[in-house]
Image (cartoon, grey):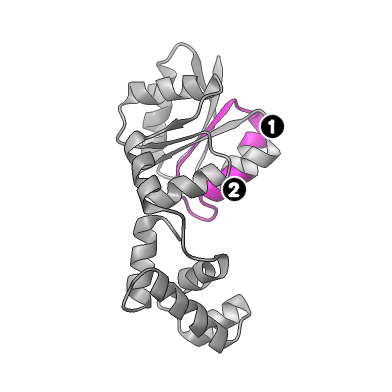
Amino acid sequence: MIRVLLAEDQGMVRGALASLLGLEPDIEVAGEAADGAEAIAVAAEVRPDIALLDIEMPGMDGLAACARITAEVPGCRVMILTTFGRPGYLRTAMEAGAAAFMVKDSPARELAAAIRRVHAGERVIDPGLAAAALSAGPNPLSGRERDVLGAAADGSTIGDIARRLHLSEGTVRNYLSSAIQKTHARNRIEAVQRARVQGWL
């Protein structure tokens, strides 16, 4: 029996996934979580074979939870299942130790088959997304540029961002300017949008 942890913030989607997987004779849903932090706690408690994580969750997202579960729960392989098929997300997920990356519009039978393949030691990646990730290239933004651009996403002023990240206002301006150039955007709002589309934030 393959024991699976489901982490998805939308209760209805999580319930539907649990029901679908419950129909498989060799798959058991051993735990459920509504966010990344809960997923880590449940994984440590139930020690599943597979952790199936959504990316977009409140608090800690699925990519951060993936890195923690991979490090802290030996023997648990992480699969990312997401609505957002963004090339940058795929690269980040692989770097965090994910064994699979699938988009949610895949048929249910493909998900069950992918769980079996990952349990058997394979890596499973949505082929269209893999091609897009290869053509998109690596994330051009440095860690600090991502931090500053992410902090600018809610419309915060330079002063607000500087205080929040413990940087000088001049340093924040430099990072923002660099991020705008690297994303080929006209301003920081557009830079945030382009970075999000690519999965760089």
**Label disc, if present, on residue 74 of the rendered structure:** 1
Query: Can residue 35 be seen in the rendering of this structure?
Result: no
Type of the residue with mark 1: Pro
SS for callout 2: helix
Residue 151 in picture, x, y percent from top left: 49, 72
Type of the residue with mark 2: Ala
| The residue positioned farthest toward the top in the image shown | 25
Mark 2 lies on residue:
37
Indicate the quadrant containing the C terminus: top left, top right, bottom left or bottom right.
bottom left
Q: In this view, does 128 lie above or below 193?
A: above
Residue 170 in picture, x, y percent from top left: 55, 88
Q: Give the range drawn in magenta.
A: 43-67
Indicate the quadrant containing the N terminus: top left, top right, bottom left or bottom right.
top right
Residue at image coords 42%, 53% = 137
* Between 177 and 30, the one nearer to me in the picture: 177
- Figure quadrant of residue 76: top right
SS for callout 1: loop
Residue 59 in picture, x, y percent from top left: 53, 56
49 drawn magenta:
yes
Q: How crowded is mark 1: few (under 14 residues within 10 Å), some or many (20 or more)?
A: few
Q: Earlier in the sequence, mark 1 or mark 2?
A: 2
